[in-house]
Image: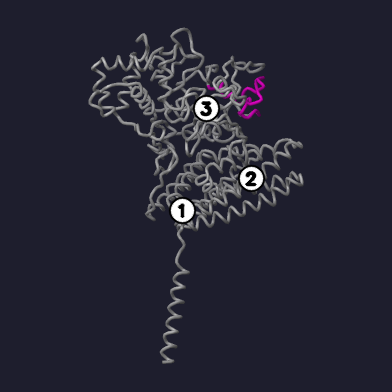
Amino acid sequence: MTGIKQTIAFVFILTTTTLLSIFCTQKQPAAELVKTRFNKELTLLQTIVNKDLFTAVQQKNKKKIKKAFIAARAQYKKIEYYVAYFFPSTSEMINGAPIDEIELGENLIEKPTGFQVMEELIYETPTTENRDELLNQVRKMQLNLKRMDRYNQQYEITDAQIFDAIRLEIFRITSLGITGFDSPAALQSLPEAAAALIGITNALNTYGANDDLDKALKTAIAQLSTAKDFNDFNRLDFITLHLQPISIKADQLRQELKINTAASGSALQDDAVSMFQKNAFNLNKFVGNYTEYITKDKTTLGKLLFNSNILSRAGNRSCASCHHEAKAFTDGLVTAKGLKGTLLRNTPTLIYAGLQRGFFYDLKAGSLEDQALDVVHHKNEMDGSLTAAAKKINQDKMYATSFAKAFNDKTGKANPWRIQHALATYIRSLSPFSSKLDKYMQGDKTQLNVQEKSGFNLFMGKGKCGTCHFAPLFNGTQAPLFQKSEAEVLGVPAHPDTANAKIDKDEGRFTLNPYPQYKYAFKTTTLRNLSKTAPYMHNGVYKTLEEVLNFYNRGGGAGIGIALDNQTLQAEPLNLSPKEIQDIIAFLNTMDDQ
């Protein structure tokens, strides 16, 4: 019995040990490993902020402050893909734009916080006020990081979300990271982009990134890490030869692992591997009413209504009266022609107008449907009524079939909403992405010449154009989510003077929402098809692109004698040479749709 007991005991111990060994060697889910890695990286960021940066600020040691700041944001960039995806509000508080956020509905003004605010304070001339505010910003950062750490412990993440976060971070680097968008003073954009790619590499290695993908990442990181000059960095090559291939290879890994795509918060297709690929955008994500999807029949009806005089009270003008297709749906006038005299502002292009989150120069409309309502009812534009127009349409049998098809309704009846939505659907369809630039980005390297390539790199680098006109739309709708359209205060003059200029009388967003921050603020419109849309700016003050580039090169209004406390455009001259200006113009012309 004793021998049997010993044998049973031995077997029990062996079995238990074996099971324990198996249990201990079972792999932790990859998503959990990524989360664990994030926790460690976040702890390191907290250490840098809590000890190095906080201490340096307290000691008022400028050299140590800069060193700690640079280290802190580089560490943040390693986890940016994770923070921006799972904690979008917190990411804004950690590294959002250094401008006031105004909640119009609640009449609240939220002051900016985070690294970009710190950067301005650190790299400006030191003052007692600056130092006090910097210490305040560091304390807020400590609280935000601590809060995120606590919430992350309760957060469940999936493999699909991790791959989506990586995909969007690659797009973020493409559009923002390498342009100097969030590092205008410290000039750390390229090493910070390298840090972001290191973070992506760590996450992908958790999933067993193959040698090809790993090599692509290491090569890209090396390119950024060894770049000697921000202005000379070849962004076009970096995007096409490094970032886009990395995105494609990462998606191939996702597919090999049979991981589904995530339902992304981006306006891009959930499976898009490049922001420049054909059909990259899901236009339905820009529809105000998400039950009203875009269809071919609605588009056809919208085009019919767009070109019809039936929407105007007198029956003497249509949308096409001011938006000429041959001129990229503009009119070539300084300001638009009204029923009586002229309107206040220049007619903007409608091409890519659907890929925005705000409409009119003052962003007063939240959707294209609302914009259509405003234009039809405007006394000096259509002077019409959608209700009256619907009655006229319902008396015309020609429209009945079109409305029946468009809205799957046998009655074929028109109503104000259907008219608005059909017009909006047609305008959303005006998003061809058929330019030389698009074709180049899709792989046809014959499309751009040396000058045009130089212009792209200047646009995205030294010229700082890409920090407001975000690729790939080149308007103010920021990648990679495309959830918000920006307005800027440029200091546009009333006349094309280059000295002692006077500000244009149009006060922009301030007219509707009288906040000082909004005075002279106007929406950032697309630069696509720019060669067809002269004259330029909200008031049509500039006849040529040379004049526009000269204005920006001088530092906007500040460089021509217009002193605005709230100018958001960098006031320092860009120091672009005449050749560099011509290179940028050559690039801008590559964005004409063909």
Q: Nearer the viewer, mark 3 or mark 2?
A: 2
Query: What residue is rendered at 70% in x and 41% in y?
Result: 134
Classify the position of the C terminus by image quarter: top left
Place of residue 232 in the rendered image (x, y in percent of width and height, measured from the top left): 59, 39
Query: What residue is rendered at 28% in x and 27% in y?
Result: 406
**Is disc 1 placed on a helix, strand or loop?**
helix
Picture mark count: 3
Q: Nearer the viewer, mark 2 or mark 1?
A: 2
State the mark number for residue 141.
2
Among the 4 quarters of the image, the one containing residue 390: top left
**Is disc 3 placed on a helix, strand or loop?**
loop
Query: Which amino acid type is shown beneath numbered disc 3?
Result: Thr
Among the 4 quarters of the image, the one containing residue 567: top right
Query: What residue is rendered at 65% in x and 20% in y?
Result: 562
Query: Which amino acid type is shown beneath numbered disc 1?
Result: Leu
| Comes first in the chain, label 1 or label 3 | 1
Q: Is residue 566 magenta?
A: yes
State the separation of the CA atoms marked 3 and 2: 30 Å
Residue 261's place in the image compared with 331, above or below, is below
- Residue that numbered label 1 is attached to: 213
Q: Would you call the spot at circle 3 few (<14 residues within 10 Å), some (14-19), or many (20 or more)?
A: many
